[in-house]
């Protein structure tokens, strides 16, 4: 069976996952993924010199085109990044931003290690969301914001064709089911009866009941 196109993570699940994170590095990663919509591997290759705290933007090498593209992210993401950097991470221009947490034998964070971190944060939920689902979640949130046009979202996600972006306009089944349940739970308004207005004398005459 084809996998459903929509894989956004519900807000309550996002909050629960974020609560489980123990380190500023992981909070920064999740905040960047959720607010920018970049692919997991694009963020993991971020280097010092690629971001701008003042503008809340950063540069990624886009998958496929290999273009160097400017992407916005939330203020919260940059706050978590600053807190992570204060912990003494290597910060020379050109150095990777994301590192393993072990003080000895520190290495750049790999996709596999980031995936395991995200899986551990979901253990108490019993869920199996993927890192790529965070990109879908970011798209869902932007699509749901009336301040964004479809072309705006296409631009942020760097889709070559807007038709690729339209997949995120499809409602999630759980949302549709919730609306249906709410519809049937609402009390029905009482039926209104309309009393006809008529001339009593005319009706009696029509029926041959004239006096």
Image (cartoon, rainbow, N blue to C red):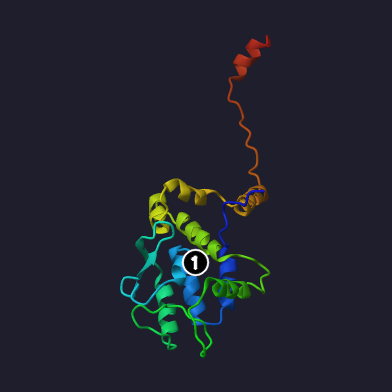
**Residue under pointer 1:** 40
Residue 44 location (% of width, % of height)? 46, 71
Residue 210 location (% of width, % of height)? 65, 10
Q: Nearer the viewer, residue 123 or 98?
A: 98
Residue 68 location (% of width, % of height)? 35, 63
Taking the image as shown, residue 188 lies to the left or right of residue 146, namely right
Question: In this rendering, is residue 182 above or below 51?
Answer: above
- The outermost residue toward the left is 54
Q: Is residue 211 visible?
A: no
Q: Nearer the viewer, residue 68 or 22?
A: 68
Taking the image as shown, residue 144 lies to the left or right of residue 19, namely left
- The outermost residue toward the top is 208
Residue 34 location (% of width, % of height)? 48, 66
Which residue is at a point 31% across and 70% down the rendered structure image?
55
Question: In this rendering, is residue 179 above or below 193?
Answer: below
Q: Nearer the viewer, residue 114 or 204?
A: 114
Q: Is residue 180 visible?
A: yes
Q: How many marks?
A: 1
Q: Nearer the viewer, residue 200 or 72?
A: 72
């Amino acid at each position: 069976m084809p996998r459903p196109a929509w894989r956004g993570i519900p807000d309550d699940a996002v909050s629960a996952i974020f609560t489980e994170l123990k380190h500023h590095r992981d909070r920064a990663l999740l905040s960047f993924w959720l607010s920018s919509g970049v692919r997991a591997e694009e963020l993991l290759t971020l280097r010092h010199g690629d971001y701008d705290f003042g503008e809340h933007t950063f540069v990624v090498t886009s998958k496929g085109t290999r273009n160097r593209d400017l992407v916005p992210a939330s203020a919260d993401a940059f706050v978590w990044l600053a807190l992570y950097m204060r912990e003494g991470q290597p910060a020379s221009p050109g150095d990777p931003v994301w590192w393993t947490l072990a003080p000895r034998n520190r290495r750049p964070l790999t996709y596999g290690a980031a995936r395991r971190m995200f899986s551990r944060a979901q253990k108490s939920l019993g869920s199996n969301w993927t890192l790529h689902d965070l990109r879908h979640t970011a798209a869902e949130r932007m699509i749901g914001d009336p301040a964004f046009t479809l072309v705006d979202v296409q631009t942020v996600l760097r889709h070559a064709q807007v038709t690729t972006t339209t997949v995120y306009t499809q409602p999630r089944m759980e949302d549709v089911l919730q609306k249906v349940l709410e519809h049937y739970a609402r009390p029905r308004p009482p039926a209104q009866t309309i009393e006809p207005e008529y001339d009593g004398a005319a009706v009696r005459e029509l029926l041959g009941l004239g006096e």
